[in-house]
Image: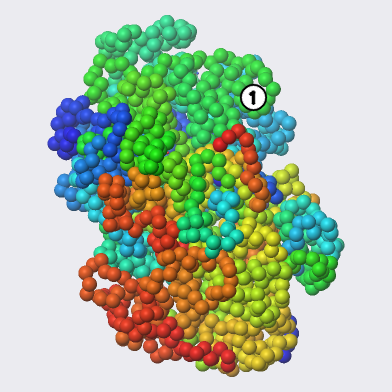
Amino acid sequence: MRHFSLRTLLTEAANAHQGWARQWRAPEPKPAYDAIIVGGGGHGLATAYYMAQEHGMRNIAVLEKGWIGGGNTGRNTTIIRSNYLYDESAAIYDHAVKLWEGLSQALNYNVMYSARGVLMLAHNQHDVQSFKRHVYANRLNGVDNEWLTPEQAKAFCPPLNISPDIRYPVLGGALQRRGGVARHDAVAWGYARGADALGVDIIQNCEVTGIVRGSDGAVTGVETTKGPIRTPRIGVVAAGHTSVIMAMAGVRMPLESFPLQALVSEPVKPVFPCVLMSNAVHAYISQSDKGELVIGAGTDQYVSYSQQGGLHITTHTLDAICELFPQFSRLRLLRNWGGIVDVTPDRSPIIGRTPVPGLFVNCGWGTGGFKATPGSGHVFAWTVAKGEPHPINAPFTLDRFRTGRLIDEAAAAAVAH
Amino acid sequence: MAQPCRLPAGGRIDRAKPLRLRFNGRDIEAYAGDSVAAALLANGVRLVGRSFKYHRPRGILSHGSDEPNALLQVDRGPGRIDPNNRATVVEAADGIAVSSQNHWPSLEHDLGAVNDLLSPVLPAGFYYKTFMWPQSFWQRVYEPKIRAAAGLGVAPHEADADRYVHRHAHCAVLVVGGGPAGLAAALAASDDGARVILADEQPEFGGTLLHDLHATIDGAPAGDWRAQALATLAARANVTLLPRTTAFGYYNHNHIALVERVGDHRARQDDRRPRERLWQVRARQVVLATGAHERPLVFADNDRPGIMLAESVRVFINRYAVAPGRRIVFATSGASAYAAAADAKAAGLDVTLVDIRAEAECGPGPAMLRARGIDVLPAHTIVGSTGRKAVTGLIVAPVDANGIVGPRRTLACDGVGMSGGWTPAVHLFSQSRGKLRYDDAIDAFVPGTPAQAERSAGAARGIYDLAACLADGWAAGGGAARDFAATPSPTGFRPVRALPTDADAKRVKAFVDFQNDVTAKDIALAVREGFESVEHVKRYTTTGMATDQGKTSNMAALGLVAEILDRPVPQVGTTTFRPPYTPVTFGTIVGSARGALFDPIRVAPLHDWAAAHGARFENVGLWRRAWHFPRPGEDMHAAVRRECRAVRESVGIFDASTLGKIEVVGRDAAEFLHRIYINAWLKLEPGRCRYGVMLKEDGFIFDDGVVARMAPDRFHVTTTTGGAARVLAHMEDYLQTEWPDLEVFLTSVSEQWAVIALQGPRARDVLAPLVEGIDLAAASFPHMAVRTGTICGVPTRLFRVSFTGELGYEINVPADYARAVWEALWARGQEFGITPYGTEAMHVLRAERGFIIVGQETDGTVTPDDVGLGGMIARAKADFVGKRSLARPDMLKPDRKQLVGLLADAPDLVLEEGAQIVADPHQPIPMTMLGHVTSSYWSDACGRAIALALVSGGRARMGQTLHVTTPTGFAPARVAAPVFFDPKGERVHG
Amino acid sequence: MAEQAARRTPILAPSAARPEAAISIAPMVPAARFALRLPEAAAKAIGSAAGFRLDMAINRSAAARDGRLAARLGPDEWLLHGPETASEAIARDVEAALAGRHFALVDIGHRNVAIAVAGAHARAVINGGCPLDLDDDAFPPGSATRTLLGKAEIVLLRPDEAPVFRIECWRSFAPYVLGLLEEVGREFAGA
Amino acid sequence: MLLVTCPHCGARPEIEFRYGGEAHIARPADPSALDDRQWAEFLYFRSNPKGVYAERWNHAHGCGRWFNALRDTASDAFLATYPAGQQRPDLGGGR
Ligand SMILES: Cc1cc2nc3c(=O)[nH]c(=O)nc-3n(C[C@H](O)[C@H](O)[C@H](O)COP(=O)(O)OP(=O)(O)OC[C@H]3O[C@@H](n4cnc5c(N)ncnc54)[C@H](O)[C@@H]3O)c2cc1C
Ligand SMILES: NC(=O)c1ccc[n+]([C@@H]2O[C@H](COP(=O)([O-])OP(=O)(O)OC[C@H]3O[C@@H](n4cnc5c(N)ncnc54)[C@H](O)[C@@H]3O)[C@@H](O)[C@H]2O)c1
Ligand SMILES: Cc1cc2nc3c(=O)[nH]c(=O)nc-3n(C[C@H](O)[C@H](O)[C@H](O)COP(=O)(O)O)c2cc1C
Ligand SMILES: [Zn+2]
């Protein structure tokens, strides 16, 4: 792997950049691998990278039906934070944040992790209580999160409208300074390059169409659009398409796939220094390094695999954005797209074994899994490599829906009232 | 001289209406009908902006919405300033001030232009390869620098002063695009009276007909045909004509979004008129007649100001009577530029035409031009341009069939019109999920199989001959096949990716995406590095991601990828087309939903009274509720103490109208409630009330409230304020889909009944004189009973219930009477010091008695047993919603969090709601958390602070001291029973 | 002892409609209103009750004597409407007519507020927030349906040939509904 | 925004409707007879296919009725709507 640095960049500049090699190979699939990861999103690629890097598994492949990073990894609003309420969640998301902090260096690929701070606004008494609950729980879990008054929030995010006369005045906010954003595409590419250098085959335009099982029920391989491939271990990391792939193995999942939309404005000079979230009015906004305001909208209400949603969803979000930032009303929407998010009943992921021997799944990240990419890949690599969960993902079982031991971040984030 | 580049005659501008605008502080004269771009060109302005990355000087490339370069800030007055406007679509209006962007200190002298010199180290994706050391520098040093350099214009700082509105519309046929194809489609479609909407983003209908001076249609000049067609359409009552209206989104099931620019083109904004209007059209059939975009040529330094699209040169001359230069070189690979060259010559300009194609390939064009005295150089390539802030010459060279490039020569010029062929505007078709098909003959993706009731027509479908466009439009509009006679259009071009050159292609800057400064070599680099998917190329190089979304660049980019990979174009494919077609203001999308109309503000019938009596309000869902009633000089704390005291000692009055209310009627009403709630309902007597708790099927508390049996077959159910809508929906769902056999009807009466809570030992005394037909005596009207009668002469459902722990009534009256009844009670209560109290006092009073609030003590993970209400569950019931879930293993664990009281060791310490609880504050992080404080208040009645908390295994911890987080550390607190006042609950019986 | 019946305080002050204006948006006087629920089959069998026609198509209304009107909002749901003073009579008559059947008659006279929208631009203004097709073909006289106006649920009626639409909404949404109509209508007001 | 055909009201814009998830998952007559696994299947597990899906819709801001629909989740096209309680229509042609 050619090292990336200012020096190599300068060398290549002199050479009209003719010397750069492929960042990852484009291999044809081998007949068999020790393990196969289905899904070349950030989670899948990170999984493969850590399997190779930390567990020495080099004879593995990532199968991607389209182009790597083309799923939700390439279409999310890139908000990264770890100030979740429950211990289990805080542990896994903070594991990820710690990896984010050194990821560019670890991968020798600038993923532009920018810890510019994530501010979540409280608009009613209930939000205030709920956010303080988070702040305190985070503190005891070693996760940074602090309560800001409206004035402090305004100081941190100057464009914010803290007038008491708006429809839902800002009563304060919870700030995680270590939170921020990263360059989503670079995350996929950086992991791909890293994994490839360790020998992982990254095979694009290769859709998994079937899961083959032996007489004992255990997996023996996959069918793909590039032919059958044998393997004793499969890690499914296919986000919105998880149900479809698991159905190939006869496994029904507690998942629904919804379109989730996002949009960007035309690029403007820096106006927005941080990431701001308002669950109460449904606004999520930051500004990319290129200058667009990146805005997250909601899910459409119906199951769909169309990566496209209705205009009313976008409208709803822009209503809220312009209420908080009336000066942005004259900015223009540049592009509006959708992804397909796989949502679990408790809004927490499922990471671990399945009823089928040799089949592992990492899914259910729903609207918020980008932030977990390194952590998720790291613990899932362990899980697939060792056949048992890492302590951090041990609570995120499929079985919790039977026992009732849910990790209900949605309930905790105050949807009731 | 004013308007030095204005042609003496012609154009569609109104020379009788001069107007004046400002550009970078300088006066610009123009005429009504000009675009800002036309006005600038008329005044000899070429340099209008700087590019995104290299800060290259840039001018005007196009004449329409595909413009990538000429982006300006427009200032229409305070609150009306915005960036990134395309000079080619902003109409010139008197008094507006426009200015260029993305430079410092000035447009002419821009220090950012050093990036152009540094460009060898700034190829596509350079930032992924560097800026990583030292680690902390990314965020402190590199990123802020990159951010400051990026972005184009400056975001507005003031709130938008304009208004926007929405409009929903329906029609049989929506025609998008009012060129020849669209006009013909609209004529055909509206012929039989069907509702037709015709929208075009330009101020005038006609599309290419607006600048085609020589064509004839059915024997008449095309302009006359256009005027006739428009007159016909305008006269048809079934036709809605929407000029200045861009269809920007094609969504599911023929739902199309359009933005109409209503205000900006008028010099002075009339305040009644909106600035823009969002149309949402649901059309039975859609005709897309959106035309085609011309392709630039990709050659070194093809971005100098003055280098334009060939057809745009023609538009500026014919439509705006502006000469984009006096000596113009047309550079083309196709036929259409010949018409432009001829028109330029006719306008008196000095014209040369260079065609990459061999003479034999060029058809009749060269002869036609030579006959007009125009020099034509076939078989020539373009290898560069000269000039810096304006083009001064085009460097051309002969090229043979093998691509061998001959000696260079510079054609001096002050304007260039380039044409690399045409790309149909398939954006909306593709958004509608129609499948594109690559048409080799015209080197373009064209609409294939539609996914919705849609037809594309004309140039949007790759049909470039005028007569054929008309016929195609007519057919798309549903007309019976007919022919149009029209002047044949010169069509056809040779697809070229990057023009052949004698220079080192690895080093020259031949722009593909002008705005984002993506060059052909960037695309080559991306492919070299393994970014083979066109979607990867887009994201690695940012080609097609600028504000024009690749309208001028996409075909070149994917063509280059195909060429490098030696794959057929359709195998490379296009990137995904997404809304909006052109950028749309947030304001348009938001419409009226601003300020008071952002979300409805729901107020209860006594809101005005409360406001007049000094209430401070809080938002609860959409509701605005009286929070507390501070007297002058009182803070919230003091007000709440006083309000609580009044209730405990005498009488308080509270507006509880926002409670949800559902009238449950029918023979099976009791059975229905029996299945919905955890407790028993079959034996509740008419005239009695009962507190009920309901779960969702997952076993967690969903809502609670008092239910009264008004008659054997009629219940009055109350819900929480926030739960009103979802409880009704939940009940309807079960009723309709699970138990359709039950004879029950549900009706929301939340807003029929206002609820006045009168609470305190003197409540009866205040109430008695106003009530008729109800015996208020404790014996005949006990706690948890309901009676009907009248109060102040109006019907009431009078509940004797209490959420405060005091003797209390909840007086339900029809909402419009609430004010009068309240005022009567208020008057009656004066002698007892009647005190209005708000939601905060209500919360304190109920907490003193240990009553839960759903959403505060519960959060969607809490079972009845967790909050100590397990005893309510009717054990005898075989089933109710949620029952089975309560038997899951995790629901039975002894360490579940249970509701307890918490008394801080320091009696006046009001713990924070949300504070976490631990057994040992000295344990290492991460600590084991036992639970959290759900409610916490100062209680006058108890003479100390009290709190409720959910604590793991809490009921077994009575008397234990635990430690509760505070802003600065931990505070010890003792676990106690969750009832702090009147533990036996005797006061309600008073 | 109650001295006299309490007076009514509607949330919007009623005003007179001006159908001849380009746009007229006028809150209406209080009225008697009931939600009537009755199984579809029963409605078909009896056709009408207490003078209210019940067997019309869903989303159609029918006028009855004395300024009364029944609008069928769903298979088993009607909105009964009449002058404010007729409230008790309507309740009594309907109860009597349906006695012995499974039905629910619930007074919602104070729950709803009505706003009349009239004038040449009435449709354009309502379509400023309402997504339905209000063309005569799609929403002919006699139409009545529950739908949305912006972020509020409404019942939209066009009782008769007159180009007057009636919007009913819940009380607390009335200021919003009126405000939205007036905001959209500004463009046409006085035009 | 989808255009949803309510069996009672005809084609109406999606915003008038509330979605209800997968159809034909009847509440068990006797939940206590189910083991934890079966109960979890009822509560949480869904087929979530890419293709034809039977799902529930409620015309919440219209006639208020629940009904079912067959929709292709890949194209979002509705293939049929039918009253609650009716069997899933057989559209023939496989899938
Ligand atoms: C609009 C939007 C905004 C979001 N915002 C945020 C945010 O701000 N912060 C945050 O943390 N999260 C956010 N998320 C969620 C986040 O994007 C996802 O949780 C995360 O990216 C999931 O990563 P992944 O690698 O699991 O999935 P993906 O990136 O979707 O990768 C799955 C891959 O599997 C492939 N695949 C599917 N089926 C097959 C098959 N049969 N064979 C082979 N390959 C297959 C897909 O093509 C895809 O590339 C957002 C999501 C969306 C859509
Ligand atoms: N000679 C050639 O090679 C060549 C190539 C292309 C086009 N043409 C000529 O162009 C004409 C094509 O006619 P036509 O009617 O197909 O196209 P047109 O270009 O004349 O008209 C298209 C119209 O659609 C409008 N439009 C585009 N997108 C829109 C949107 N999203 N919303 C609203 N309006 C939108 C444009 O403003 C334009 O007025 C013919 O005269 C043809 O000869 C010639
Ligand atoms: C954080 C982020 C920033 C983006 N910025 C831009 C942008 O500046 N310009 C642009 O055209 N698209 C931008 N996009 C959107 C992509 O072009 C694209 O729409 C998205 O990756 C989804 O892919 P698709 O539209 O090809 O399906 C951005 C996407 C993300 C996730
Ligand atoms: Zn309906």
Q: Nearer the viewer, residue B924 or A100?
A: B924
Can residue B640 be seen in this snapshot? no
Q: x and y percent of residue B419 in the render? A: 41, 20
In the rendered picture of this protein, how many numbered marks are placed on residues?
1
Above or below, comparing residue B738 to residue B377 in the picture: below
Above or below, comparing residue B295 to residue A54 in the picture: above
Q: Give the quadrant of ligand 1.
A: top left
Chain under disc 1 = B
Q: Amino acid type of disc 1?
A: Trp
Quarter occupied by residue B243: top right
Image position of A224 (left or right of B225): left
Q: x and y percent of residue B103 in the render? A: 29, 41
The way the protein has been coloured in the rendering is rainbow
Q: Residue at x 36, y 83 (%)?
A: B958
Quarter occupied by residue B213: top right
Can residue B421 be seen in this snapshot? yes
Secondary structure at numbered mark 1: helix
